[in-house]
Image (cartoon, coloured by chain):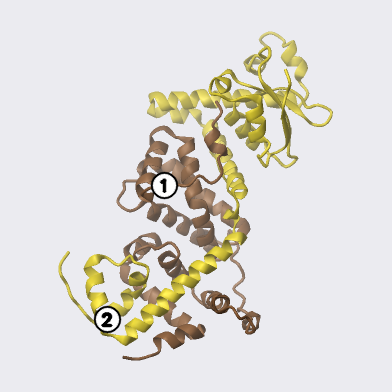
Amino acid sequence: MALKSVESESPRLVGSPDASERELLERIARSKDQAAFRTLYGSYYQRLSRLLARMSVRREDIEEVINDTFWVVWTKAGEFRGASQLSTWIIGIAYRRALNALRRAKIRPVSDEPFDEDSISVMSTDAAETDGQWLALGLTRLPVEQRMALELTYTLGHSCEEVAAILDCPVNTVKTRLFRARETLKQVLPALAGMSGEKS
Amino acid sequence: MSARIPDTHAEAWALLPWLANGRLPASDREWVEAHVAQCAECRGELDAQRKVAMQINRDTSADAAGTPGSTGTDEQRSFNKLWARIEASESAAPAMSGASGGFSSRTRTVRWLAAAVVVQGFGLALFGFNALRTNPPAGEIVTVADVPAHRLNAPAVRVVFAPEASMAAINTLLTHQGLSIVSGPGTSGNFTAELSADAVASGASADSVAAVISKDPNVTFAQPVAR
């Protein structure tokens, strides 16, 4: 039988993301629905790619971590009980897989060489571009746990409780990690230092 | 949720990232916003965090071009790899999948059997055992008898696989499109694959299948066979 859905490029979900995704997961758990699996995979591929890149996972290893994650989704779909958001479950799997792999040195982290401050274009007339370069510098100064807390909050828009579930740590630890990340960024980013330096 | 109103600077300060991203629960948002309204330092920090959020998202968009997920082709290729892995794993242990019973497990078993037939047929063609298919020694090789029968005037495509394409990937591609290899390899490495009756019944044609598989990274050439 020709499964045309498998060939569709980057199918995207519409409507309530979590409800739509849970429906897909139920189809996978109930009938090993390949089309549902492909759609769910497509809705996470870019999100996870960017998150893993931020974790210093090398580009050539990112696909392996994503596929390991979705291997778990395929085999354990029926075990998801809905205690958390589906995105929390899937991103949490990817995070732990990447972290374990990095720790075991199975995959090589991107070099943590010091950021070359001279590479920031002081001649650039685009303030946003310059700020972006400073931010890139700042992010390289953060430990991976702090970087992830920041990414999950600002890029993926998770609540504090969801970040804690993904990173598998207490809520107060998430707050502490973000507090420290903010302090570090402030030391690196001139624009930020100016903004919050004013005392009431 | 209790109506706790701490209204302390330190606690409000810690929660500012989630006020910035709009994910602070209503029970906290109320008192944090009230604190921010009368605290210049927290207002400055909130502005700063909004700026960080904006920059990270801007940076993320720019990074998109450098990540594996930047194109649908990368994503499809990656999914094909995963699917080949899943199929290889499940076909290696078909008996286990039957343990739960039910309709889905039966249909899956049929699918794995069909996939196995395709692999066997393709393997025979690949290694030049076409003679066995046309004139099999009775009862000697069971797999030969299981190769799908050549149907008269069945829609077919001519296909050349990429040199780096794995057997698992080719198997996945053929199975998904309802194709069975019936001849090849030709002098230029081409195979002829026929569409199954099921694929035709579901609306697939030689033209449509050739168009789809020609975009697959495991295929370098595909065209419908005129019959």
Residue A180 visible in the shown view? no
Q: Which label is found at residue B217?
A: none
Which residue is pictured at 84% across the width and 28% down the height?
B187
- Relative to B3, B10 lies left or right: right
Does residue B20 appear anywhere in the picture?
A: yes
- Disc 2 packing (10 Å; few <14; some 14–19; many ≥20): few
Image coordinates of residue B195 in percent, x first then y, are 63, 22
Give the secondary structure at mark 2: helix
Q: Pick the quarter of the image with the N terminus of chain A.
A: top right
Instruction: Please state which amino acid type lies under the numbered disc 1.
Output: Val
Chain of the residue on which disc 2 is drawn = B
Contact flag, marks 1 and 2 (Cβ < 8 Å): no
Residue marked by disc 2: B37
Give the chain ID for the brown colour: A
Q: Colour of chain B?
A: yellow
Residue situated furthest top in the rendering: B138
Instruction: Please identify the residue farthest to the bottom as the structure is shown.
Output: A199
Which of the labelled discs sits on residue A14, or is there none?
1
Same chain for mark 1 and mark 2? The answer is: no
**From what the image shows, is residue B121 above or below residue A185?**
above
* Spot occupied by residue A16 in the image (x, y as percentages of width and height): 36, 49
Q: Nearer the viewer, residue B81 or A157?
A: A157
* Residue shown at 28% from the left, 80% from the top: B36
Q: Tell me the SS state at disc 1.
A: loop
Q: Residue B17 location in percent, x, y?
A: 36, 72
